[in-house]
Amino acid sequence: MVNRAPLPLSRRTFLIVGVVTAATMVLPPFISAKACAANAARPIKSAVTLSVNGEQRELELDTRTTLIDALREHLQLTGTKKGCDHGQCGACTVIVDGRRINACLTLAVMHDGAKVTTIEGLGTPGKLHPMQAAFIKHDGYQCGYCTPGQICSAVAVLEEIRDGIPSHASDNLIDAPQLSASELQERMSGNICRCGAYSNIIEAITEVAEANT
Ligand code: FES
Ligand code: FES
């Protein structure tokens, strides 16, 4: 027969110990949330140098600053538009080291030393870039909100095709991509236009592409 020793803890003590143990398990996240809040109040800053539209710009940025916020809020280059702010609309498209990217999806510190071209760097009201002129000629916009991103994207698209980079619409991965409407539509599909100026945008891009061949 086994002799069972009486439990050294009363039921009440057992419950108290349980509550204290649970509180200890909950406490660390609570403390870490407080620590996070304290850290957020003291942002970590970093020096960032960008060549923006041919001009060297020195910035001291919170490391969490996105490229679009660096351009718009710190350099006052408000031509680049913020639409969705999470990579869905293409309104924030700029050209970085020759490639178009969504400026809302990338941190400025990731591009230290990079060459950034925004809509302001493509042309001026007195000396439009051919793509800007074509958008005007073909009514490639209505409200114009998506237009800076559309134009930056379109300029980079023609470079991609010229460099032989295939898209999902290309016939194969070996031959040079064609300058077809479906090729342009596919490549521009990341740039949303709420006004629905798509067919005119493709006409504008086609005209510039044909003028360059
Ligand atoms: Fe960047 Fe919409 S604002 S993709
Ligand atoms: Fe209005 Fe494109 S012109 S969203």
Image (tube, grey):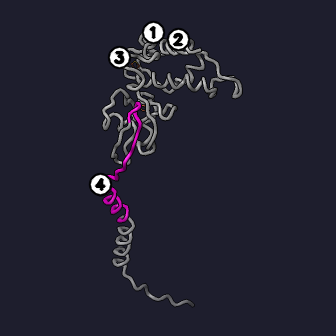
3D distance between C-alphas at marks 3 and 1: 17 Å
> If you read the primary sequence from the N terminus, does the residue marked by circle 1 or circle 2 appear first?
1
3D distance between C-alphas at marks 4 and 3: 42 Å
- Determine contact: label 3, label 1, CB under 8 Å: no
Residue placed under numbered mark 1 in the picture: 138
The residue at label 3 has a CB less than 8 Å from ligand 2? no
> If you read the primary sequence from the N terminus, does the residue marked by circle 4 or circle 1 appear first?
4
3D distance between C-alphas at marks 2 and 3: 20 Å
- Nearer to me, 84 or 177: 177
> If you read the primary sequence from the N terminus, does the residue marked by circle 2 or circle 3 appear first?
3
- Determine contact: label 4, label 1, CB under 8 Å: no
- Determine contact: label 4, label 3, CB under 8 Å: no
Which kind of residue does numbered mark 3 sit on?
Pro
Residue 69 x, y percent position in the rendering: 35, 37
Instruction: Give the residues in magenta.
Output: 27-55
> If you read the primary sequence from the N terminus, does the residue marked by circle 3 or circle 1 appear first?
3
Residue 61 x, y percent position in the rendering: 34, 46
Which kind of residue does numbered mark 2 sit on?
Glu
Of labels 4 and 3, the one closer to you: 3
Residue placed under numbered mark 4 in the picture: 42
Residue placed under numbered mark 3 in the picture: 125
